[in-house]
Amino acid sequence: MLQDLLCQTKGEFEFTDDTAEYLTEHQRILRLPFEQVLLMVAELKGEELASQRSFADPRTKFEVTSVEAQLDDALCDFWRKTKVLFQGCGATAEEISATLKCR
């Protein structure tokens, strides 16, 4: 629950009709010592930054060099949906993402 609250971005909220039981169950999370909350936030941000560094820039172009590999079902489905992007001048992660969201 605390992680969900920390991950909210400006303007995100929702109204819920939670039961008293649900609220009682999650009140213990909201009673954490301040130092522990700071440590948790720092850890989450550190993990987020570390994972961001492991990804290529979203504008990086990916090209197909060979189509001889054996693909499992998930990769076959991915290839079927995106192969037109890779034929020619390649595709960026942004283009691939946009194509997959449209389907």
Image (cartoon, rainbow, N blue to C red):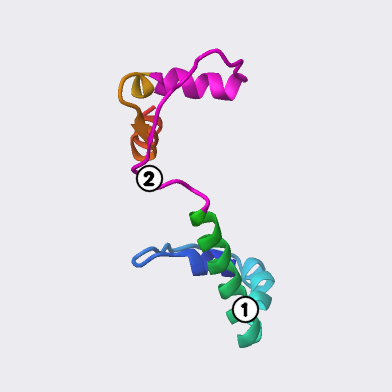
Residue under numbered circle 2 = 58
Find residue 86 and report its horizontal and vertical position in percent.
Answer: 38, 23
Q: Quadrant of the N terminus?
A: bottom right
The dot on residue 53 is none
- At which x and y percent is residue 64? 44, 22
SS for dot 1: helix
Q: Is residue 16 above or below residue 58?
A: below
Q: Which of 48 and 16 is in front in this view?
A: 48
* Magenta extent: 54-83
How busy is the neighbourhood of tag 2: few (under 14 within 10 Å), some, or many (20 plus)? few
Q: Where is residue 84 in the image (x, y as percent from the top left)?
A: 35, 19
Does 96 lie within the magenta span?
no
How far apart marks 2 and 1 lie (CA) works out to 30 Å
Residue at 55% in and 24% down: 75
Residue at the far top: name it.
Answer: 68
> Which label belongs to residue 39?
1
On the picture, is 92 further left or further right than 68?
left
Q: Is residue 79 at least partly visible in the picture?
A: yes
Q: Residue at x 43, y 63 (%)?
A: 15
Q: Label 2, secondary structure: give it.
A: loop
- Residue 81: x %, y % from top left: 42, 21
Disc 1 packing (10 Å; few <14; some 14–19; many ≥20): few
Residue 25 is drawn in which quadrant? bottom right
